[in-house]
Image (cartoon, coloured by chain):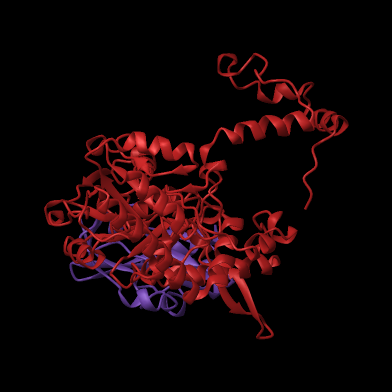
Amino acid sequence: MKEISELHLPIDRSYSDDHEWAQKTGDTIRIGVSDYAQDQMGDIVFVEMPEVGDTFAKGDEFGTLESVKAVSEAYIPLSGEIIAINEALEDAPELVNNDPYSNWLVEIRPTVAGEFDKLMSRDQYLAFLQG
Amino acid sequence: MRYLPHTEQEISEMLAVTGHTHLDDLFSHIPDNCRFQDEVDLPGPLTEWALSETFQGLAKRNAAASARAVLLGGGSYSHYIPEIVPSLIKRSEFLTAYTPYQPEMSQGTLQGIFEYQTLTARLLGMEVANASMYDGASALAEALLMTLRIGRRKQTVAVSTAIHPHYREVVKSYLRAGKFNIIELETGSDGRTDTSGLQQIDGLAGVALQSPNFFGVIEDLGNAANDIHGADALFVSCFSEPFAYGILGSPGANGADIVCGEGQSFGMSQSFGGPGLGMFACRKEYQRSLPGRLVGETVDLDGKRGYVLTLSTREQHIRREKATSNICSNQGLCALTAAVYMACLGSTGLRQVAKLNHDKAEYLKKGLMEAGAEELFSGPTFNEFVLNFKFDFGSIREKLLHRGIIAGMELGRLYPALEGAYLFCVTETTSKTVLDEVINEVRP
């Protein structure tokens, strides 16, 4: 597993303490897992996605990632309605290991204003990981 | 691995460590009024001779034990068990093996399960079969739960009334605790389930049919599959007599998504109702929602063939309360029995025995109809069928019973509307002489 200093944590994402990232793309927000999360899980073999149209409140479980050693729940970092899922992951879940940032999980339309701004910046997340 | 009880000394040593005086102190958190205080009311001990006499006496009270012929089906079937089956499964490596906690250490057990899965998947026309479940009834309940898992927000399942009534009871027990709805589908005059109105049902996750059904009638699975898929639901095809697939098209080939049922017919004695074998298979796209254990074949570091438990992340020891099922074992010995039985018959043997079942059943059906009985349902049948009598068949049945022939089962107890109708079953074990004897007794 990687040392914290080896983790790739891009500056253009916001992070949750459940190790998800969020990025604004116009009116919608893309969500994925951080490099720390994919590294902890190991080889991901299956991603279980919600359905387009599902709505979640911040902190709800919206999917699961299954690796060779465990199953991890994915918790949504902000409330919203699913408007797209990354279908490429259904056949190639290992893409999340290869690059957790270009391989997002879901795209949502946020339903509660202000939640995005409460997420951690890159530096705050790094400090959170360093404990 | 040995299972030896603790000695008194070991128990006192352990109690000394935990700081308790009596074993009962460990249960002190259970309120007194919830605990059974009296002595258990059981008869005293018997000598070995007296004990075996007692049980032989009990066994003799079952008509089936001394019968010359049992023309009963209804979920439990009298098939011939070739000697190779008990000879192999009574080997101590199989008979005494417990469920493997270090599964990959037990390559023989895993290979046996893998062979069973392979034969089951091939017979049912499915891509994946699990390592087995308890029996046909629990397998059906698990299959319906699986359709609700896959259907996510959908909360309704539809179940044919021509499915074995006991299976439907088990389904109700399994689903009672959830907020699910069970709709029952009626049968038509052909004895086949009416699947025409499914599109009107909201949130329908799965529809279950049995074929041949409880009345012995072979369902039109292809037509049902169209209706069920047209209602955007999954098709669960279940069975109590897998021998039918020796001559009929497999449920998988007819569009079923999940196939499950009772495997007792494959080498297991009837044993007054158990143990059974829950056979369970599905299409590959649903394998992550599959309940139960699953064995896969792989290669080791040296490229040699080996077997592993696979997709274990569905299971309870990893997923806890989110597991696909709370069954985390399988019917190991019964699954092995079925594997040995299927392998020893082969597809040719299976077809031959199935054809014997069908032909003998048709012989009795035709004979009884010529003797005045009427077929209750017009649909095609395999080795079971329902007849109605304009005269008192009950007293004829009683006469045959005294001669050691159990001629059919009256349906009123399970289907009050069908009182007076009898369900008959004929397998390869019944001779033509016996069938003629029954027909002659009925003939006026």
A36 displayed left or right of B223:
right
**Image location (x, y in percent) of residue B14:** 81, 33
B7 displayed left or right of B353:
right
**Image location (x, y in percent) of residue B141:** 38, 49
Residue located farthest toward the right when viewing the structure as drawn: B9
Picture layout, residue B352 above or below residue A128: below
Instruction: Name the one closer to the observer, B264 or B232.
Output: B264
B3 displayed left or right of A21:
right
Instruction: Name the one closer to the observer, B331 or B72.
Output: B72
Say which residue appears at 73% left-offset and 20% top-offset: B44
Indicate the quadrant containing the C terminus of chain B: top left, top right, bottom left or bottom right. top left
Picture layout, residue A47 above or below residue B199: below
**Image location (x, y in percent) of residue B161:** 26, 46
Say which residue appears at 69% left-offset and 62% top-offset: B87
Q: Quadrant of residue B297?
A: bottom right
Residue B172 visible in the displayed image: yes
Picture layout, residue A25 above or below residue B381: below
Give chain B's shade: red
Residue located farthest toward the front when viewing the structure as drawn: B444
Q: Quadrant of residue B103?
A: bottom right
Picture layout, residue B256 above or below residue B430: below
**Image location (x, y in percent) of residue A109:** 20, 62
Say which residue appears at 27% left-offset and 47% top-offset: B387
**How many numbered tags mark residues here?**
0
Give chain A's shade: purple
Residue A114 visible in the displayed image: no
